[in-house]
């Protein structure tokens, strides 16, 4: 995950398809999207066993960006960006794509994948906080409820670890990744880029790849193992082809045919799928505190992401 920005929802999510049958197919694709993003968490953890984090992110973001560029060209979407919009595109990309993905790679190396998935999903909560200060968006009851549940979820996760002396860097890295994503969202809302969402995704992924390449050259040994294990290769291909390239295309198609609130249900399913995937594939055993935090964080995100009855009815 890590690539859902509010301006995508604003541009595409408000439009429903004029063909209800077609819209039904796209609604049915929402659980598939949640599976693609959710199982990406254990896939990344597997790939990082043999591939260094900077190298992994550089290669994955570069390949994903190139594939999406090919999709855009096939669809005859312009890859051009207005000259005056490059800085805002780059800043948002540095925060919500580059920093987000790089931090999460190190977070997964520093702690359980299931816990990283839960903590990272506080992204919508940080967006609400920053939107209040930088965009002057009001804090209504639903957003206050979301903030309260989000804080409670973090306390439920962190306090037992703190008392036991087991609070690892992974928690802080995941939290920082979520904050960076939220800041990138605020930049995108405050300074929108006049380009198709797929075009924005292409360039921001390539910007992220460039940043990761700098880190790779500066901090890592460039030699890869002579032969990667099959599990590593499959995990890398899953991450690039399915959880990034295919998921991007699917996400934008869903937003173009169903309401944004309905599409948001898919994002709410990502943390539970990620936790289940970590248990099933990696053999992780989340604690009771992890599950309590998961429920609270999902409740917090739901109160922020899902539309109220008043807005839904007009």
Image (cartoon, grey):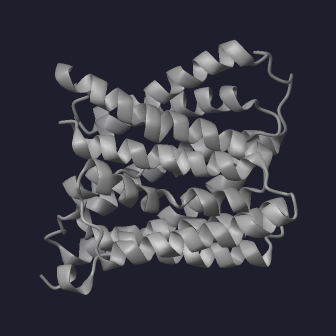
Q: Quadrant of residue 313?
A: bottom left
Q: Quick check: 155 above or below 92?
A: below
Q: Seen in the image, is 116 located left or right of residue 6?
A: right
Q: Nearer the viewer, residue 262 or 123?
A: 123
Q: Quick check: 274 above or below 240?
A: below
Q: Seen in the image, is 286 located left or right of residue 241?
A: right
On the question of residue 280 being in view, the answer is: no
Residue at the (78%, 45%) spot, across then down: 110
Q: Quick check: 314 above or below 112?
A: below
Residue at the (59%, 16%) spot, across then down: 214
Q: Nearer the viewer, residue 9 or 103?
A: 103
Q: Quick check: 151 above or below 141?
A: above
Q: Position of residue 207 (x, y in %)?
A: 44, 25
Q: Position of residue 264 (x, y in %)?
A: 38, 68
Residue at the (86%, 22%) spot, across then down: 226
Q: Position of residue 67 (x, y in %)?
A: 45, 34
Residue at the (12%, 81%) spot, across then down: 314
Q: Nearer the viewer, residue 156 or 313?
A: 156
Q: Position of residue 16 (x, y in %)?
A: 18, 69
Q: Quadrant of residue 270?
A: bottom right
Q: Seen in the image, is 166 located left or right of residue 79?
A: right
């Amino acid at each position: 995950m890590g690539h859902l920005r509010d301006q995508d929802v604003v541009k595409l999510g408000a439009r429903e398809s004029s063909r209800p049958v077609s819209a039904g197919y796209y609604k049915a694709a929402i659980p598939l999207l949640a599976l693609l993003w959710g199982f990406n968490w254990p896939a990344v953890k597997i790939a990082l066993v043999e591939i260094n984090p900077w190298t992994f992110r550089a290669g994955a973001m570069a390949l994903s960006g190139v594939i999406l560029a090919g999709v855009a060209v096939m669809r005859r979407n312009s890859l051009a960006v207005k000259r005056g919009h490059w800085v805002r595109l780059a800043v948002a990309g540095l925060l919500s794509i580059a920093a987000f993905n790089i931090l999460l790679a190190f977070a997964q190396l520093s702690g359980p994948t299931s816990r990283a998935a839960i903590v990272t999903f506080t992204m919508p909560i940080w967006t609400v906080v920053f939107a209040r200060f930088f965009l002057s968006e009001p804090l209504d009851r639903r957003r206050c409820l979301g903030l309260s549940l989000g804080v409670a979820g973090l306390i439920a996760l962190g306090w037992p670890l703190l008392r036991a002396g087991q609070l690892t860097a992974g928690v802080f890295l995941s939290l920082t990744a979520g904050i960076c994503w939220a800041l990138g969202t605020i930049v995108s809302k405050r300074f929108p880029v006049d380009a198709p969402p797929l075009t924005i995704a292409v360039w921001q992924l390539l910007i992220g790849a460039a940043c990761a390449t700098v880190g790779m050259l500066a901090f890592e040994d460039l030699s890869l193992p002579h032969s990667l294990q099959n599990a590593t290769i499959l995990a890398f291909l899953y991450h690039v082809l399915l959880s990034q390239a295919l998921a991007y295309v699917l996400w934008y198609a869903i937003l173009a045919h169903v309401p944004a609130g309905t599409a948001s249900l898919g994002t709410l399913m990502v943390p539970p799928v990620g936790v289940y995937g970590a248990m099933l594939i990696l053999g992780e055993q989340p604690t009771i505190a992890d599950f309590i935090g998961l429920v609270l964080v999902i409740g917090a995100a739901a109160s922020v992401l899902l539309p109220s009855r008043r807005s839904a009815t007009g």
